[in-house]
Amino acid sequence: MRGKRQDIYIGRRPPVRRRLIRTPYIVVLVVLAVAAAGFFAYRYARLARPPKMVVVAEVNELKVYYPSPPAKLSMKSVPVKNTLTDREKADAIIRALRTGKALPDTLSLTDFAADTDGTLILNFTPDIALLKLDPLTEIQTVYAIVNSFLANFTKAKNVQLLAAGQAFFTIGGTVYTYRPMEFSSHMLED
């Protein structure tokens, strides 16, 4: 009897037929691997390159509010460099308020911070709680500080005033300053 060649196995095992992985599956696997490598290379290249510096203008203006008669605040623009840090901007606002006689020369800002809730924390020397101001001047002084800072720090929602790291209730008994204060548009000139 004559059998087929593949049916006759003398002294050996029959060969195992392996199914070859089909070419389309290999192609899809290679394409996925190349796409993943490209994606991660792009992310790495984007993170590795330094950010571009965009300078719009060399001079910027700070809006500073000063007390003006009758019981209002007037806004003046103060030119400053555009590359100021937040602390330098805060110091420039305090300097401008001093030159406009809204704050005494003895008063200085010791610390400046912003929290995640949008509150600017201004820590002054203890002199701020000891100022002897008449009620109208106290209102104008407090809101000159608050409005000036909130006008120049756009992400801020309110301002917390501190004296030597402690919140104080009022400067002269008129304006409650223990809690963070918001921008007051009622004080602005028409």
Image (cartoon, helix red, strand yellow):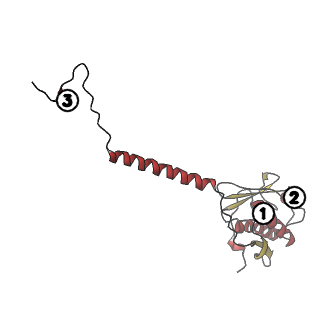
169 and 36: which is toward the camera: 36
Mark 2 to mark 1 CA distance (whole Å): 18 Å
Q: Kindly state the secondary structure of the residue where label 2 is placed.
A: helix
Residue 88 position by quadrant: bottom right
Q: Position of residue 103 (x, y in %)?
A: 85, 67
Mark 1 to mark 3 CA distance (whole Å): 91 Å
Q: Is residue 56 left or right of residue 133?
A: left
**Which amino acid is tagged 1?**
Ala
Please tell me whether mark 2 or mark 3 is closer to you in this view.
Answer: 3
Vertical relation: 58 (above or below) 49 = below
Residue 159 position by quadrant: bottom right
Q: Quadrant of the N terminus?
A: top left
**Which amino acid is tagged 3?**
Gln
Outermost residue toward the top? Answer: 11
Q: Kindly state the secondary structure of the residue where label 1 is placed.
A: helix
Residue 159 visible at all? yes
Badge 3 is on which residue? 6
Badge 1 is on which residue? 90
Q: Position of residue 82 (x, y in %)?
A: 75, 68
Mark 2 crowd level (few <14, some 14–19, many ≥20, 10 Å Cα): some
| Badge 1 or badge 3: first in the primary sequence | 3
Badge 2 is on which residue? 127
Mark 2 to mark 3 CA distance (whole Å): 105 Å
Mark 3 crowd level (few <14, some 14–19, many ≥20, 10 Å Cα): few
Q: Position of residue 35 (x, y in %)?
A: 46, 51
Q: Is there a contact, CB below 8 Å, between mark 1 and mark 3?
A: no
Mark 1 crowd level (few <14, some 14–19, many ≥20, 10 Å Cα): many
